Image: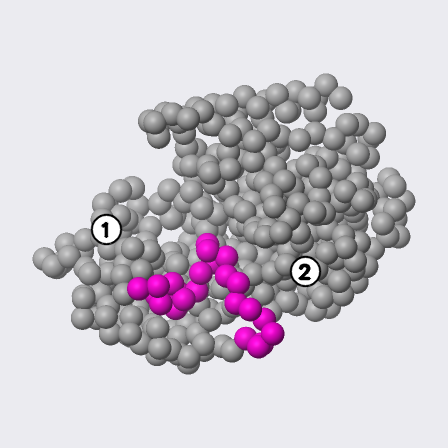
Amino acid sequence: MVTNKEVVVIGAGLAGCEASLYLANLGVKVKLYEMKKVQRTPAQKMDDFAELVCSNSLKSNDILSASGLLKCEMLKLGSTLLKVANDCRVPSGGALSVDREKFAKNVTELIKNNNNIEIIDEKVDSFDLSCPTIVCAGPLIEEKLFVFLNEIIGEDSCYFYDAIAPIVTEESIDMTRAYWGNRYNKGETADYLNCLLSKEEYLKFYNELINAKTVELHEFEKLKVFEGCMPVEILAKRGEDALRYGPMKPVGIRDERYDEKPYAVVQLRKENLMASALNLVGFQTNLLFGEQKRVFGLIPALKNAEFLRYGTMHRNSYINAPKALNQFSSLKKHPNIFVAGQLSGVEGYVESMASGLYCAINMYRLLNGKKQLSLPSTTVLGAIENYIYSASEKNFQPMNANYGIVDAENIRDKEQKKKNIYEKSMEEIDRFLEKIKEN
């Protein structure tokens, strides 16, 4: 398919674009395969690459949070997509949220304008195992390719279900029951539209939600849901107050026009800088479209809401990474084949970018006959990569950035512990970069 002087990258999602740009910017010729023009997955809506199919949030920017620290590590390591994300940022408090259309467009332009990247609009069913390849086909990987990959690994497929939240127009919202603001009025700008509910309104909404009709799944598919992508109707069935301690938590929310504190709140986040489109935060759902309009219309501010996109659920596939991958995220049986992104068992937008970057770094070293490098678990990226290759093979589940998997001193003062983790991480990333420069 290609010579050993070239690299094949399968999939132009977040991991594939990050890996392709890293390698191409170092002079490597990249053949980037993307099937969008031939066949789209159920979640894809855009023609551009690096599409954010669920939320437009890349989570916290706080450097003392696991997600914020991972971003710091990636920027030091040379992430291109995070730089683009910062250029496409929309206000969302302490989080990094982007205008998803602008983000995808800008990444696509970088890919198309890079002379070292050849875009091939084809569906890939298999690939040449002798060619250096990074498989970034994503959690909605085409079935034949997934079967081929599992045959190489010798493992049955793994999967979980992921859900997408609805998007509504700003002009259709009843602003007499909503206000722009942040929790505890923190931040210079009011980044969230808060839709308030009284106890009576919440209970009516709650009872209709838990009894609403959902899209039926095939009988042979057991409903395995990743905790971070829990459909709101499933979360609600855990108890009457489950939503009030989750996405509808009213703590720190106060509309000065009313004396009474809200019993519950639905927060909407800007999809673009104009704030003409808003995402229902934490409202991933598998309800029928008609049921979404009916049930979410019971939220007073959304009684006449116009839906630009309804929520949907789709099946996400991933490999059994502990059985298949080594510490460099390449196949144990075929070290020149790397697997990146959610297909490898990482979970989340930023984590997928980081995985693509990590694979590209080691792919570049492989091409140049250099020793592969791994990061210690005292870094967030190192901890994620260590987890996916060393976890139990029997019940492997995807992992996102969190401090529970990071090696750290046992200090009671949580803030000091986070500071120590940050400082140690930055030291290790600097050492890692020095090793790269030495060779």
Q: Which of marks 1 and 2 is nearer the N terminus?
A: 2
Q: Residue at x 74, y 30 (%)?
A: 372
Q: Identify residue type, mark 1.
A: Val
Query: Residue 48, image x and y in percent?
Result: 63, 58
Instruction: From the image, give the main secondary structure of the stretch colored magenta.
Output: loop
Q: How crowded is mark 1: few (under 14 residues within 10 Å), some or many (20 or more)?
A: some
Q: Which residue is drawn at 49% across and 64% down?
A: 163
Q: How crowded is mark 2: few (under 14 residues within 10 Å), some or many (20 or more)?
A: some
Q: Identify residue type, mark 2.
A: Ser
Name the residue tied to disc 1. 251
Q: Which residue is drawn at 43% across and 58% down?
A: 271
**Residue 4 vs residue 186: left or right?**
right
Query: Residue 199, image x and y in percent?
Result: 18, 66
Residue 279, picture quadrant: bottom left
Which quadrant would the C terminus be assigned to in this image? Answer: top right
| Disc 2 element | loop
Depth order, front residue of 80/128: 128
